[in-house]
Amino acid sequence: MPTDPQPPDELHLDRVHQMEAAMETLNMRIARLAIALGVSLDNEGELASLMGEEHDTSMPDERRVSADPLDAVHAHIGPEGRVAHQRQELRGLLVMRYEVEKRYVDDAGIPVTHQIMIEAEQQLERKGFKPGVDGINLDRLFNT
């Protein structure tokens, strides 16, 4: 049963809403990790320190002992290992967000990407997050 294609404006609007939702989800995870780790992403020094950290990707022998991979990852790494893993995840998410932002600019242009970022940030604030907790500074990012 064929459906009539949506007009280009509606397709564009749907895509922009999807992009906003994806950015909001990504920013929320970044914000939650930053809060949990006590990392102030709106502080250039802390951000540079986080991004410059070396990380060890090797797994200790005891992590490979369990038959259940989730047990091995969670039960044997300890608090320090969990923090290191979370910091590594936070770094990865920040890099991924940069790549997503770049793709949005390439695909939709700077004005649309700027609006997407504004909407995503406003949504985080409506959910109780403080401005900048996710490391986004829209004024600096878009030179406004």
Image (cartoon, helix red, strand yellow):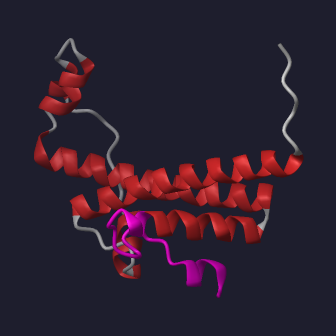
In depth, the one of 108 and 52 nearer the eye is 108
Horizontal and vertical percent position of residue 114 = 66, 71
Q: Residue at x 17, y 17 (%)?
A: 65
116 shown above or below 29? below
Is residue 52 at least partly visible in the picture?
Answer: no
Q: Relative to 96, is 18 on the left or the right?
A: right
Q: Is residue 142 magenta?
A: yes
Q: Residue at x 83, y 13 (%)?
A: 1
Main secondary structure type of the part rendered in magenta: loop
Horizontal and vertical percent position of residue 36 = 22, 59
Position of the C terminus by quadrant: bottom right
Counting labels gives: 0
In depth, the one of 23 and 15 nearer the eye is 15
Is residue 141 at least partly visible in the picture?
Answer: yes
In depth, the one of 74 and 126 nearer the eye is 126
Horizontal and vertical percent position of residue 87 = 31, 55
- Res. 109 image quadrant: bottom right
- Res. 125 image quadrant: bottom left
Q: Is residue 79 magenta?
A: no
Span colored in magenta: 124-144
